Image (cartoon, grey):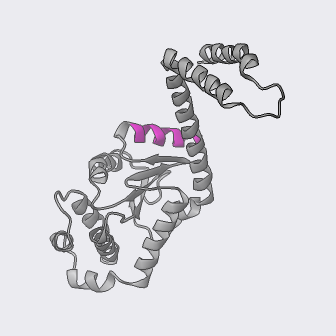
Amino acid sequence: MRASFLRFVLGLFLVLPLAAPTRADEPLTPAQKAQVEKIIHDYFMAHPDFMVDVLHAAEEKLKAEQANDAKQAIAAKRDELLHDASAPVGGNPKGDVTIVEFFDYRCPYCKEVEPSLEALIQQDPKLRIVYKEFPVLGPASVYASRIALAARQQGKYAAFHKAMMGTKGEITDDVVLKVAKSVGIDVEKAKADMNAPEIDDLIKRNYALADALDIQGTPAFIIGDTLIPGATDIAKLRELIAEQRKSG
């Protein structure tokens, strides 16, 4: 990219004396402006690889900036991410590495990743998972999250979560209650408990936390100071877990 850019700049220096106005503070005339624009246009048409390089460089710069912003936001919100006593926890509650997952029960990508998370829990006895209910896909999602958090009071959160993540097809309120009943939840009690102020507060805190981290969809994962937006595979999760253990 550098060689192409230098050729382009040198070309402009050669022609600008012909196009530039007599005074530095005078704007380009329409004819001069058109000449410069033609030079730029012709260069890009003759060197499309230069534009590709520019776009790639811009994309990499943006990714680096986003990753840095995420690290700073995670550091500022670390206690809320890892130690909210109201948030359900899976795996080993005293594990040495934590995965924080923002998810929605109606999200097909969340369900796609779920088997990898379950496999990691089974394979890694030192892994801790914090579940952040983040219902963003409509009223049925909110209903499912409320029932899930109410089920926690009956000691049934993990069973309900696993069953919901394995449920295919359209998720409606009736489907949510059917799943709840299938794992032994007292449905009437859960329906009474689901609108408790503490459940409402937890969901609101999760929304605010996602906003602070610029999480705009599900799933999203946080391991250490790394934010992974969207679905990922078990190999990537293992890699980040290993890096986190290595860094301490």
Indicate the position of residue 113 as horizontal and vertical percent values: 31, 48
Which quarter of the rendering shows the N terminus?
top right
Residue 179, placed above or below residue 4: below
Q: Residue at x 22, y 62 (%)?
A: 163
Which quarter of the rendering shows the C terminus?
top right
On the picture, is 76 further left or further right than 236? right
On the picture, is 230 further left or further right than 31? left
Front residue (pair 108, 45)? 45
Residue range of the region highlighted in magenta in the rendering: 236-248
Indicate the position of residue 235 as horizontal and vertical percent values: 37, 36
Q: Is residue 18 visible?
A: yes
Q: Residue at x 25, y 65 (%)?
A: 159
User: Magenta segment: does it hold 23?
Assistant: no
Q: Indicate the quadrant where residue 62 lies.
A: top right
Front residue (pair 61, 172)? 61
Q: Residue at x 38, y 46 (%)?
A: 124
Residue 134, placed above or below residue 61: below
Indicate the position of residue 68 as horizontal and vertical percent values: 61, 44
Q: Main secondary structure of the magenta part?
A: helix
User: Magenta segment: does it hold 237?
Assistant: yes
Indicate the position of residue 186 as horizontal and vertical percent values: 21, 80
Q: Residue at x 61, y 27 (%)?
A: 34
Front residue (pair 77, 50)? 50
Q: Indicate the quadrant where residue 187 lies.
A: bottom left
Residue 74, placed above or below residue 59: below
Q: Is residue 248 visible?
A: no
